[in-house]
Amino acid sequence: MKDLLNYLFDHNKLTKEEAKEVLIDISKSKYNEAQVTSFISIFLMRSITVDELEGFRQALLELAKPVNIDNTELIDLCGTGGDGKNTFNISTLTSFVVAAYGKKVAKHGNYGVSSVCGSSNVLESLGYRFSNDMNILEEQLEKCNITFLHAPLFHPAMKFVGPIRKQMGVKTFFNMLGPIVNPVQPRYQSVGVFSLKLQRLYSHIFQKTDKKYNILYDLGGYDEYSNTGTTKLIRRTGEKLVDPSHFNLKACENKDIFGGNTVQEAASIFTNLLENKSPHKHKEVVSANAAIALSLYDKDASLESLYHEAMEIIESGKAYGTFKQLIRLSQEKT
C-alpha cells in the first residue's frame, strides 16, 4: 500500500483494473486502518475518475453475495447521500409508493454514515428484519412488491471499511458506490447524486448497461428531487430540467423537508407520511419523486398525471398497507 499511496500522492490515477484490485485487497484486510483511511482520503481531495469508479464497482459486485432474482422489471430508488441536507427518507418512502402502484422494488440501502438516518436505520427502527435469504426476498416481492437489501448482508467484504467510514463521518467514494452495487442489478433505476460531476460519471457507467434510468441532481445541492427548485435529470434518451411547475406545485423551502435530528424523529416523519398525517409538503416531494420514477415505465404519461396517482396512493393508505405487510412478513419469516 505504501507504494500505491505514494503513486497517488503524486497526482496519478488508477486504471479500472488497478482500482478493482486494490478494493479487493482492502476487502481481504491486507492493509491496516491507517492505510485504508489514507487511501479513502485521497478521493476527498481530488475527483474520482470514471475508470476508478467502475473498477471499485466491479470489485464490489464480484465480491457480493449472489442474488438470483429476475431483474427484468425490478426498480431501485436511492440516493448517494452525502449532500449534507439531512432531508427525511424521501427515496425510501417513494419506494413504498412505487410498490403500492404495482411496480416491483428491490431497494438497496444502508445505515447512515454522513447523515442522521439512512434507510436501514429507519426501517430497522420500525420493525423490519433484514435478511439475505433468497426465499424471503422473493416472497416479499411477490406479496408486497418490495423487498429491502441491507447492504452489509450482501457486501460482507466491506465489513472492514464500515467502522472507518463511520469514524470519518464524511461522504467518501463509498457513497458514490452504494446505488450502483445493488446485487440484484435491477433493470430500472431512479438514483439521486450529490454533484453534477458524479451525475456525469453515473451516466457514463449506466450507458454501458441495459438499464432504464433516471439520474437526478437537484441544483440546490440535493441528491434527489427536493421540490425546492430545479433538478437536472439525465436519462439514456437525453437530459432535461424538472421543477415544481411540472407537477403544478409551488416550490417548498429547505426547512419543509428537514429529516429530524434523531432516528426516532426520522421514523416519526416516515410513519406520519404513510398514515397521511404529515405536512402536505412532505407528500408533495414524495409523490413527485414517485412520478419521476414511474415515468421510466410510461414515457407517454405526464409527470403531473403520475404525481396525482402517487398522491392518491399515499392519501388512500395503499402505501401504508404495503409497508405494514412488508414489516409483518419480515418478522414472520426471520
Image (tube, helix red, strand yellow):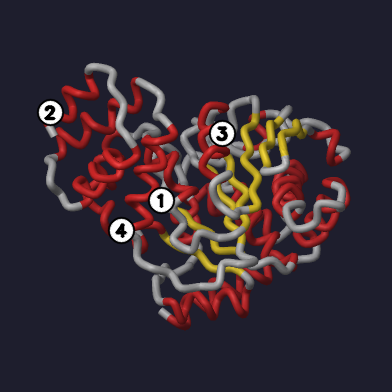
- Is residue 269 visible in the rendered image? The answer is no
Tag 4's secondary structure? helix
Q: Residue furthest top?
A: 10
Residue at image point 82% right, 59% down: 312
Choose the circle earlier in sequence order: 1 or 2: 2
Q: Nearer the viewer, residue 232 or 170?
A: 232
| Distance in Å between CA atoms under marks 1 and 2 | 33 Å
The residue singled out by tag 4 in the image is 63
Q: Judging from the image, what secondary structure is the residue with disc 2 in?
A: helix
* Dot 4 crowding, Cα within 10 Å, few <14, some 14–19, many 20+: some
User: Mark 1 or mark 3, which is nearer to you?
Assistant: 3
Choose top left, top right, bottom left or bottom right for residue 94: bottom right
Kindly state the secondary structure of the residue where label 3 is placed: helix
Task: Name the amino acid, label 1.
Answer: Tyr
Residue 111: mark in rendering: 1
The quarter in which the C terminus is drawn is bottom left
Q: CA distance from mark 1 to mark 3?
A: 23 Å
Q: Which image quadrant for residue 52?
A: top left
- Going from the N terminus, do you reach mark 3 or mark 4 first? 4
Name which residue type carries label 2. Answer: Asp
Question: Which of the two discs, 3 and 2, labels the residue nearer the N terminus?
Answer: 2
For the N terminus, the quadrant is top left
What residue is drawn where x is 61% and y is 79%? 142
How packed mark 3 is, by other alpha carbons closer than 10 Å (few <14, some 14-19, many 20 or more), is many
Q: In this rendering, which labeled residue sits more in front, label 1 or label 4? A: 4
Q: Are marks 3 and 2 in contact (CB under 8 Å)?
A: no
Q: Which residue is mark 2?
A: 3
Front residue of this view, candidates 298 and 80: 298
Q: Quadrant of residue 26?
A: top left
Q: Which mark is residue 199?
A: 3
